Amino acid sequence: VKSSGGNETGKFGHSFGYGFLHEDINNSGDGGIYAELIQNRAFQFSEAFPVSTDSYVPINNAALSIKFLDEPLSKELPASMHVAAGNGSYDTGKIGFKNLGYWGMDVRVQTYTGSFWVKGAYDGHFTASLGSNLTSDVFGSVEVPSKSVDDDWTEHTFELVPEKDAPNSNNTFSITFDGAETKGLDFNLISLFPPTYKNRKNGLRVDIAEALADMNPHFLRFPGGNMLEGLTNDTYWDWKDTLGPLRHRPGFQGVWGYQQTHGLGLMEYLEWAEDMDLEIVLAVWSGLALDGNYTRQEDLQPYIDDALNEIEFVCGPANSTWGARRAELGHPEPFELNYVEVGNEEWLAGYPEGWETYRAYRFPMFYNAIRAAYPHMDIIAAAASSDPAPEGETTGPNLSEGLVFPLDAVGDYHPYREPDELVLEFDRFDNDFAHIIGEVAATHVNGAEYPRWNGSLYKFPWWIGAVGEAISLIGYERNSDRIPGTFYAPLLKNNNRFQWPITLIQFDADPIRTTKAVTWYCWSLFAHHPISHTLPTHSNTSYGPLYWGAGMDENRNGAMVWKGAVYNTTNSEDYPVSVHFQGVTPGTMANLTVLTNSVGDPYMYNDPLTGVNIVHTESSLLTAGSDGVFRFSLPELSVAVLDTEVS
Ligand code: AHR
């Protein structure tokens, strides 16, 4: 049986990459991996999401109201919150507000870094505190001196170290001041960060970032997904709005039901990639929005120029126009960039007209411009060979024949599927051209009713889904001469914001509940055993219920690796496996790692509320027999890796 096919991964210059798509969905950015604790910190708004004092609660009857002052903090942040003594009684003279955070805040003995801007005359001090939302407990507070004035904005900065850990995450951050000393004050950009991943200013939440890094990922694709496209042609994710000081970031009308801060901007994504040593897939806006409207050919050039500027910002030398802007923001060294994608799921929004225009001129115009400026880059078209044909045509996009897209373009394939269907993915790319698997996940249970997307997705990634997914991953990896990598999507979910339940990591304000989904364990296992080359394989049985692929890793002294999974729910007997790597002699040792579901039920998942992890990991050291063969057996619904690197 032909398995891996002996493909070289050389074209892409790296081992098959396991990675992530990130966009802000399920509060995965704001209130998620972006570590800011204050929700609605700058009263940002958009047509879809009106400005409000949401997430703020008055203290001692203070009156909170939104103002659009003649002299706002910046033109990008025109709204602010006015805080004045209310009509009610308060005995201490202290008034102010608390912020509820993103459904709470994790409070422990560590240094929190905060800031806020005030306009209005006040000669006194503010008290910034972290306290319980349930009791009167205050875990820590700090006095912040002020000499703010009427005619300008004054920034206040502070560090706050609580004296004790809070028992739970139902906590708030408050600012109070002496109400009798002012006529009222205007506040904006109220910000509070805990320590961040790799101590970046404006950085990432440590536990979530560590959970991702632990997977040994290779790729980060951003900024979406749908987020890149925007709801309308006027509201796409404009990278320029995301740069520089927070007071000059206007925020973004998110596409998943909430306003976004733009705190997690282009530079933060790049630093995320740098800090986890991830290869970047940068998606540039192609002129098509989710409502199906698209930019006409005659108006497209400015957007192509904009994409070239964005690419220059990422990887241009520090003396180029946009490279200089990056240098000014603290990163003179260019980031490495080898993959650029033009748009997202272009066959979907505005089908068929938008899709026609993508094939007819939008992709070719972007492609030609990027190819001319950056000959080394892989340019990704936001569609796969299997996506629906335009009306009146019977074939797919014809990417492979070069009729529409240049032959060296890479496609982007997004299988959100049932586990059975993912198993069928195993040989999907044996005879196709280059694609990234830009988004993939088991989302629906087997036999889900059609039309599937009208029904609900499963609750969390579940075991049989993870095994089906693992088989599709082996199928992609064994074609790694044409498939540079695969991206889990969507990546994260704050359990308090529901758009899409199937994510790699779930979390809420309390890191104790940050949960790696079952599927994380399969991706992690495969990612921790990279291969630089696939190997041709032969077998005396055909695929199913056992699926496998094999390879060797030049970067680990030629270690031989076998990856397999058993997809069978009807046979409770273990499945016997014999693996012989050519050239491996009797007595050679190898590590076998086998993942199974410890509770039996194939529909079980790792539940953030109970904290139970159902993935059972077993490792053993095997010795090749006198015939050089490794013999072992695998249970039903298991995922395994055999690796001759033994340390
Ligand atoms: O991952 C969720 C969404 O699925 C992405 O935004 C989009 O690209 C796809 O349709």
Image (spheres, helix red, strand yellow):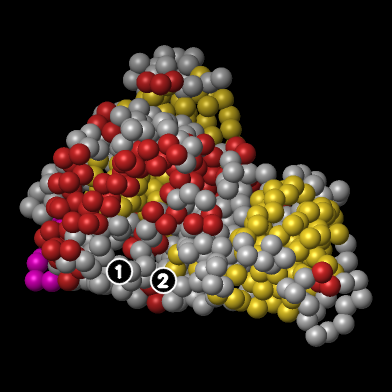
Density class for disc 1 (Cα within 10 Å; few <14, some 14-19, many ≥20) is: some
| Mark 2 secondary-structure assignment | loop
Residue at the bottom extreme of this rendering: 87
Q: Tell me the amino acid under the disc marked 2.
A: Ala
Residue range highlighted in magenta: 391-398
Q: Residue at x 39, y 48 (%)?
A: 221
The residue tagged 2 is: 448
Q: Nearer the viewer, residue 117 or 403?
A: 117
| Mark 1 secondary-structure assignment | loop
Question: Residue 265 magenta-drawn?
Answer: no
CB at mark 1 closer than 8 A to ligand 1?
A: no
Measured as percent of width and height from the top left, residue 125 is found at 81, 58
Measured as percent of width and height from the top left, residue 633 is found at 50, 37
Q: Nearer the viewer, residue 341 or 306?
A: 306
| Predominant SS along the magenta part | loop
Q: Residue at x 70, y 69 (%)?
A: 185
Q: Are marks 1 and 2 in contact (CB under 8 Å)?
A: no
The residue tagged 1 is: 233
Residue at the front extreme of this rendering: 151
